[in-house]
Amino acid sequence: MIIQQISVFVENKPGTLAEVLDVLKAHSINLRAITVADTADFGILRMIVNNPGEAEGILRQAGFTVKITPVLCIVLEDTPGNLHQKVQHLSAAGINIEYMYAFSGMGTQEARVVLKVDDLTRAEGLFN
């Protein structure tokens, strides 16, 4: 399924992540998944939240540079090799994965994988 991801450009310094999370908390935005890609001076904070449209607006109001990106989220059985099978399926279709991150809850037999791919519509069609 295609979902909306929030990306926030942040300085790589102590307290910046806390500032973003404070804004989200103050507006009752719930995090579902989070990852950070960084360099020496800045980072890109990527998040899946319960209300991406509202999160984008409040983060912009707070002075952050924010972008909403459609990404693919697939649910797969939490077993060895399952992700490999899905990635091979995308590869065979000529779909490039730009980045990905995954999460699963304790006590569940499912994992969720968020993928940024170069052909979102075709990728979604492969898993429906």
Image (tube, rainbow, N blue to C red):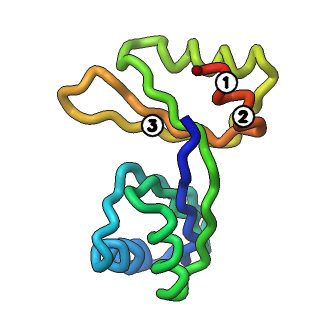
Q: Is residue 66 left or right of residue 97?
A: left
Location of residue 17 in the rendering, given as x and y in whole percent from the top left corner = 41, 72
How packed is label 1: few (under 14 Cα within 10 Å), some, or many (20 or more)? Answer: few
Query: In the rendered view, would you say 92 is above or below 98?
Result: above
User: Do tag 1 and tag 2 residues touch (Cβ < 8 Å)?
Assistant: yes
Mark 3 — residue? 102
Residue 65 lies in quadrant: bottom right
Query: In the rendered view, would you say 67 is above or below 115?
Result: below
- Label 2, secondary structure: give it: helix
Location of residue 111 in the rendering, given as x and y in whole percent from the top left corner = 38, 28
Tag 3: amino acid:
Ala
- Location of the N terminus (image quadrant): top right
- Label 3, secondary structure: give it: strand
**Cα separation between marks 1 and 2:** 6 Å
Q: Which mark is residue 57?
A: none
Q: Which mark is residue 121?
A: 2
Tag 2: amino acid:
Thr
Location of residue 104 in the rendering, given as x and y in whole percent from the top left corner = 33, 34
**Cα separation between marks 2 and 3:** 20 Å
Q: Which mark is residue 125?
A: 1
